Amino acid sequence: MYTTLVKVIYFSVARRFALACFVFSFAVYIFSVTTPVLAKENTLTQQLETIKQQTGVGAVTYALVENDRVIATGGIGQYSSDNKREVTEDSLFRVGSITKTFTSLAVMKLVEQNKLQLDQAIKKLAPDLPLQNPWPQTPVTLAMLLEHTAGLQDLTKEEFDYPLPLSLKKSFTIKPETKKLHWPPGCHYSYSNIGAGYVGRVIEIVTKENYDDWFEREVLAAMGMHDSQLHWTKKLQQNLITGYDVDLKKEIPYWHTLFRPFGGLNTTARDMAKFLLLFTNQSTEAKKIISTTSIRRMETAETSLAAKAGLGTTYGLGIRGRHLDGRKIYGHAGDADGYLAEFAYSKESQRGYFVMINAFRHDLLERFTERLDNWLIEDMANNEKSSLPPVVKSLSQKNIKTLVGDYHEVTKRFPSNNKSSEKLHIKNIDNDMFRCFTSTNTNKDRCTKIVPVTESLFRTENQSHASIAFIYASDKNIYLQTGYSNYKKE
């Protein structure tokens, strides 16, 4: 009996010892795996702090996510030159045009509920809204408004600077004569803040609710963004980080965007991290307010001539695609008078970031986004030069002759814009094609060689993907589109 008792005690101790060893080994493994990751994240946030010091901006907020987790949120700096309160991940700021991505989310949610369709005509959905369309055979659709291909110019100065918060319905009474198309709908991309106003008003009509209330409940609250809102209050303004002009010293007052669906969102870095997970978290569909299929549609442009021709660097439903070292990145930027912001993500790395500065200095924001863009793709193999697409062996002389010539811009974003200071020419030099811009002031050419990826899509020599589309349109004109600008051959 004594021997049996000894054996029992021995094996009990042995099992406990083995279990302790296993727990210890597992802990060491987890530590060894997570420590480099945490170190990398800490290094990245430290680099953001360094850039903040180098640029002199007063406040920075950021959010970093990977796969299904938030890996960092934070704030650097203080609320204003007079308010020494420290900025954190819970500090309020404005994101400007990033609001348009949220507006597209709102539409896609209603599309999934069969309350809206992207190809519905705006005049049928909201017949009382002012909209002059000289091309009635081609109605303006919801998709065109969200992709900026409706044919609208942007707001006038009076509309941009309107000093009071108005309802969406009332907002359309301000300069209604400007609500007209300047080129055929569904042809050219031209950024216009007016489109989101139409979309917001349509949502009010369909839901029979005030847009701000519906949006905050069905979109923001549905993502857990409980510290975010569209509508202005005195309390909100008192809690905002102060925005500054280009000199980093002059305060810019609160901007009452005429149509809040285009740029009125007030939010925090902690809330924006939850938004980013919508695009990087592939582990569960149930937690998303819209499906992965709807997100793919947001990432894909369909209504412009360039999109139909297969150009990938185009603007979808509130999301633009671009390439960095051969890798596709998606996102949107925002300007809210005193604040500049940007979010971006990679579907390959499943990483995403958001960053905001409280200064109207795009060059300073680029210091942050350049580092964060590299973080999105830094662990991936291959660079841009190793992933260049093959060049079409040769274009026929007839094809080259057809494309060569002078082109003029056919879209103009702002009504007050003067004539372009540059002219565009496509030239054939020793059977190589060049895109040349000629300054009207100096009469000097700035030329870049372009190479064919297909018969109609071209890229520059160092680009990984096509960035130029030549389109033989149904109106018998030849157009050159880049995803940003639109030209017609003379």
Image: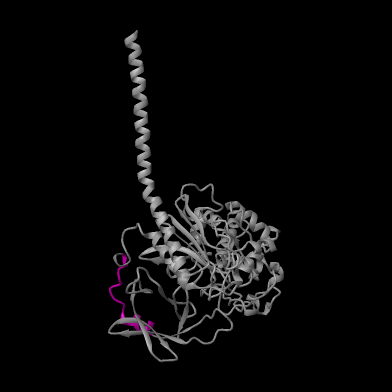
The type of colouring in the image is one colour
Furthest-top residue in view? Answer: 1
Residue 396 vertical position relative to residue 288 in the rendered view, above or below: below
Quarter location, residue 131 = bottom right
Report the residue at 51% width, 82% height from top: 410
Q: How many marks?
A: 0
Residue 340, how many percent across, how many down? 53, 68
Residue 261, how many percent across, how many down? 62, 65
Name the one closer to the observer, 135 or 20.
20
Q: Answer with left or right where residue 122 lies relative to residue 295.
A: right
Quadrant, the C terminus: bottom left
Instruction: Please tell me whether residue 391 belongs to the stretch shown in magenta.
Output: yes
Residue 44 vertical position relative to residue 423 in the rendered view, above or below: above
Q: Answer with left or right where residue 23 lies relative to residue 162.
A: left
Name the one closer to the observer, 201 or 274.
274
Quarter location, residue 442 = bottom left
Instruction: Please tell me whether residue 43 belongs to the stretch shown in magenta.
Output: no
Name the one closer to the observer, 226 or 144.
226
Residue 305 in view in this figure: no
Quadrant, the N terminus: top left
Quarter location, residue 166 = bottom right
Residue 53, how many percent across, how many down? 46, 66
Residue 415 in view in this figure: yes
Q: Which residues are the magenta region?
A: 387-404
Residue 374, how many percent across, how many down? 39, 63
